[in-house]
Image: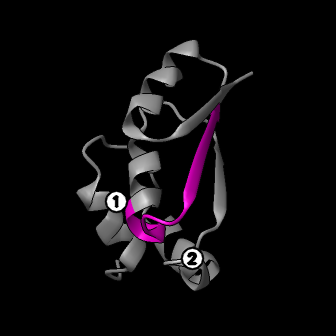
């Protein structure tokens, strides 16, 4: 597997998420142009929260990271600076 920036961000996440190894090259191809910019990024399906941290690391501190999940327990990630919507 190629060492991509998104894979490096994934490894730094304090909470792990399940990602297929082929995702990271695609993530870099699609999203690298947004690194360091004040974009809004929405992730549908937060589960254990690990990928929220991955996206923050990958996109940078200016990105607004929003998580959407059916489980009300996902609100715990709001204390980490993420916006969470339940529904």
Disc 1: which residue = 10
Quick one: label 2 or label 1, which is nearer the N terminus?
Answer: 1
Q: CA distance from mark 2 to mark 1?
A: 19 Å
Q: Secondary structure at mark 1?
A: helix
Does 61 lie within the magenta span? yes
Quarter of the image where the C terminus is located = top right
In percent of the image, x 45 and y 48: which residue is there? 51
Locate residue 23, reporting x and y percent: 52, 66
Disc 2: which residue = 37
In percent of the image, x 48 and y 69: which residue is there? 59
- Specify the quadrant of the image occupied by residue 69: top right
Locate residue 49, reporting x and y percent: 43, 37
Locate residue 5, reporting x and y percent: 37, 78
Residue found at the far right of this picture: 87
Q: Is residue 65 above or below residue 5?
A: above
Residue found at the far top of this picture: 72
Locate residue 19, reporting x and y percent: 45, 53
The span shown in magenta is 57-68
- Specify the quadrant of the image occupied by residue 80: top left
What colouring method underlies this structural image?
one colour
- The answer to whether residue 54 is left or right of residue 13 is right
Query: From the viewer's perspective, is the residue at label 2 or at label 1 nearer?
Result: 2
Numbered circles on residues, count: 2
Quarter of the image where the N terminus is located = bottom left
Badge 2: few (under 14), some or many (20 or more) residues near its Cα, within 10 Å?
A: few
């Amino acid at each position: 597997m190629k060492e991509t920036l998104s894979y490096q961000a994934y490894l730094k996440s304090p909470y792990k998420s399940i990602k297929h190894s082929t995702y990271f090259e695609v993530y870099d191809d699609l999203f690298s142009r947004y690194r360091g910019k004040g974009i809004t990024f929405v992730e549908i399906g937060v589960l254990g929260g690990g990928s929220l941290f991955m996206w923050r690391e990958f996109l940078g501190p200016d990105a607004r990271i929003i998580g959407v999940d059916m489980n009300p327990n996902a609100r715990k990630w709001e204390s980490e600076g993420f916006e969470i919507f339940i529904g």
